[in-house]
Image (spheres, coloured by chain):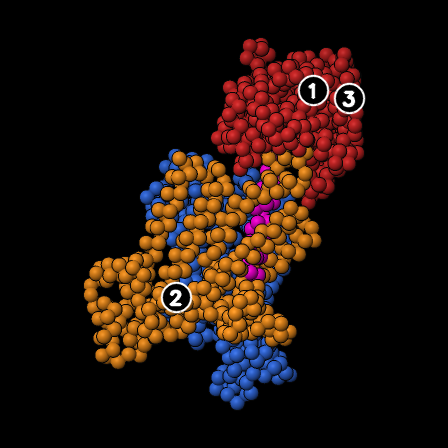
Chain colours: A orange, B red, C blue
Amino acid sequence: MGSQRYLLRKVLHALLTLLFVLFANFVLFRILPSDPVQLLARSQHLSAEDVAEQISSLGLDKPIPEQFVVYIRQTLTGDLGVSLRSGVAVTELIGERVGPTILLVGVATILSTLFGLWIGIRGGWRRGSAFDTSSLYSSLVLYSMPEGWLGMILLLFFAGVLGLFPAGGYSSSQTITGFAHVVDVANHMFLPCLTLTLGYIGEYAIVMRSSLIEVMNEDFVMTARAKGVRDVMVRRRHAVPNALLPTLTLVFLSFGFVLGGAIIVETVFSWPGLGQRTVTAIGQRDYPFIQGAFLLLSASVIVFNLIADILYGYLDPRVRES
Amino acid sequence: MTVLSLRDLRITYRTQSGDVPAVRGVDLEVAKGEVVGLAGESGCGKSTIAGSVLRLLPAGTRVEGEILLDGEDVLAMKPGRLRAVRWAGASIIFQGAMHGLNPVRRVGEQIEEAILVHGQSKEREARARVGALLEQVGLPARRIDDYPHELSGGQKQRVMIAMALSCNPSVVIADEPTTALDVMVQAQVLRLMKELQRDLGLAMIFITHDLSVLVEVADRLAIMYAGRIVEEGPAERVFHQPVHPYTGALAAAFPEVGDQRFRHKPSGLGGDPPDPQHLPTGCSFHPRCPVAFEDCPTIDPPLFDAGPARRAACLLVERSGDQTAAEVAR
Amino acid sequence: MATAAPEAPTPADHGPAGKGHRAIARTRRSRAFLSYWRTFRRNKQGMVGLIVLTFFVLLALFAPALVDESRFDLLATATEPAFQPPSASHWLGTDQFGRDVLSLLMYGSRISLLVGVVATIVTMLIGSFVGIAAGYYGRKVDTVLSALTNWFLVIPWIALAIVLASILGRSLFNIILVIAITSWAGTARLVRAQTLTVKERPYVERARALGAGDWHLVTRHILPNVFPVIFANTVLTVALSILSETTLAFLGLGDPNSISWGVMIQEAFYSGALSSGWWWWLIPPGIAIVCVTLSFTMCGYALDEVLNPKLRSR
């Protein structure tokens, strides 16, 4: 059936892209630098013996094709190498930090999508109204702000001046449990989440708005009105479902950017997530960790895009046929 | 019995570059069971009239005059009454082959929506009724669950027709229903529309730029130019013995195979329709008129009597009676 | 009625005998440019954006003349008090080295704008080349180039940027390169779509039937008709490039020797400006970035309306 073949095609495509990411990861770290060994030595200030030891343990003395096979095998079995700084397995380090990132990014994505779409719909449906003009300009201004800076401003004002929220971190104390703990985390998460949400809400609103305006000029919307359907229903049943399609695609495609924003926001708010740890790793030149983070980030985006494709196939019957 | 009556209808669009008078005083009556053809080139205002009957024109458009549907003035209706009248009093057949149907919903659902909105049936009954409607327009009832993209242009147009009939309106306005179709399919759909109109005794306004189609379908013909009706009368007579020079040119542009007229002189009309914001002085047709004379740029002719149940807005008609202008035009 | 560029030249355009087709084309192009400018002028947001941009560009160009180098030279300011709030001698206060923040702000416009514009030009060149090649040649070439483009689109830009910057090292050239490498795919996709549309147009088919070669078709027919889309997109991309530079600077991947608004924000943050409440150091660079980015965006939208009339509002 059309839908099954569509699904298969999309999954295959995602896997292929993932494979290419692995390949790129390898190329970037082993082939691109003129001398990966020197790269290593320089960054970690190693002595000559340490360098020799690292070379053999990392397998850098073997021929490149063999290195590639080893790399693939290691990655597929979950071995992403060992942090150059702490000696801890990268997988373990990532595991510790993934939770807070997923929490932050998840909530921010949901909120920015829901509110962004709502604002875009409301503005587009009543084009030129006060709501539309003000939301359009606010969206443009938010879209033009560097996320890190927005976070800092919010922090400066709400935490610094007003003292309403903590200045960073995940929780105030290890000893609180249960509901109080949830409240505490939420309290800490409020500002970083707000920053991340505001950063993308503008873009989603603008895209949804223009998509809706385009659909509103289509004949079938006039047909619906002519049938005597109420304005609200015309919007809900005819205009929005059609306008949602290209918008959702764009929202999903922006996920990569949301992840990027998360890295910055986590740093500003000292939110103990994967992003913050990656920034530290950059400063420390901890290449295995950076490699692992790159893999994970890319894989997340690929999976997200796959979900987007599936969702699109579900929403738009025309796509399933091809 | 008059089902739809347009009285001194004037419609002005508001755009960034100023007001655009799309319709400048139109009077039209459609009786029960009658098919009135409304013809003219693009931009003459015919589609605007279609949209105005159910008040579907863009917000801010100025509509003046009277639109009496079954005796009630549509322009004075409150929103609730308007919504009830839409589709149940009058319905519109749009160009289904293009984007008249919602691409992401099944066609049966879209027809059902009209029925359910007007509270004419409950859900299960509505579905059965939709099936019956589809069969009435020559489609198998199982098509009820198809999406628009699964249907051909002709089939989509039939769906639009079924949808227009779903609430038993008094008058159906067909806005260029066959324009986007292939010639063979056009003929089929036209035949269908004629049958349905006859069987159901529908009043219909058939809007098109193709006069040859109207000759087959319409009882009466109204020719529009630059926002006004310039000739009206019985369809056959208007087409074969046009009185207004524009009608003559329009009819000549659609040659009929076998009609001797077209064998020797294939013709067309030069120039473009006038810009509604910069209409010519006097008679708006005079720059393109093959028989314009010195009075034409100064006097704007109203509709004069040009024979039994015929009127034409041409100074030649006023002067010399109905036949002469046609002679001169040819 | 859309205001379109004048079509074929009327007989009156032929000046003295033998004016030649190039001169006619030039007249037509300058008339087209004037009509575009008039349409652009009507767009209020575009004009505001253009004025603000002009201001910043002039600022960047004349900064060396306006700003006394000694105000932010490290040796000269060694004796100045650090972390000072705004005062008469330092309108925006001082930074961690006692440098005058206002001078830094004005001088920083140079690098920020330079990186933004140059990175965008490189992005546009790569993206246009790939996009036109993929769209024009089609089939195998298209499959390969499109797969490449899609891959670069899927990878989160910041992840790729971090990886590249870590390996390549920190320098101005590398920052520009990294931004270009992570941005070209968006342009390529847009250009490819537009090329495909233009390729189908009748005049291209006709030219080919008349025996025109690939080079002629691309330079004389495809390129001029794809250019408006490219140009509008370029302006919007500059906004994104400036934001990217800010992000990369914040992550510590910027050029350590240059001053840009992004670097100012980074230095302020890592010196503890947040906890100490040194707002005069943190806020101005951000406002500058927002102004410039917003202006480029509004100009870009206005240009899109002017050059791509289908999207123009009624």
Residue position for label 2:
A94
Q: Residue at x 55, y 41 (%)?
A: A242
Mark nearer the viewer, 3 or 1: 1
Q: Where is residue C186 in the image (x, y as percent from the top left)?
A: 45, 53
Same chain for labels 3 and 2? Say yes or no. Answer: no
- Label 2 sits on a secondary structure element that is helix
Residue position for label 3:
B303
Under mark 3, the amino acid is Leu
Residue range corresponding to the magenta coloring: A197-219
Q: Residue at x 60, y 58 (%)?
A: A139
Gap in Å between the C-alphas at discs 3 and 2? Answer: 85 Å
Q: Which residue is drawn at 26% across and 59% down?
A: A73
- Report the side of A169 relative to A8 (left or right): right
Residue position for label 1:
B203
- Report the side of A1 relative to C269 (left or right): left
Mark nearer the viewer, 3 or 2: 2
- Report the side of A311 relative to C47 (left or right): left
Marks 1/2 in contact by CB < 8 Å: the verdict is: no
- Label 3 sits on a secondary structure element that is loop
Q: Position of residue B219 (x, y in %)?
A: 68, 15
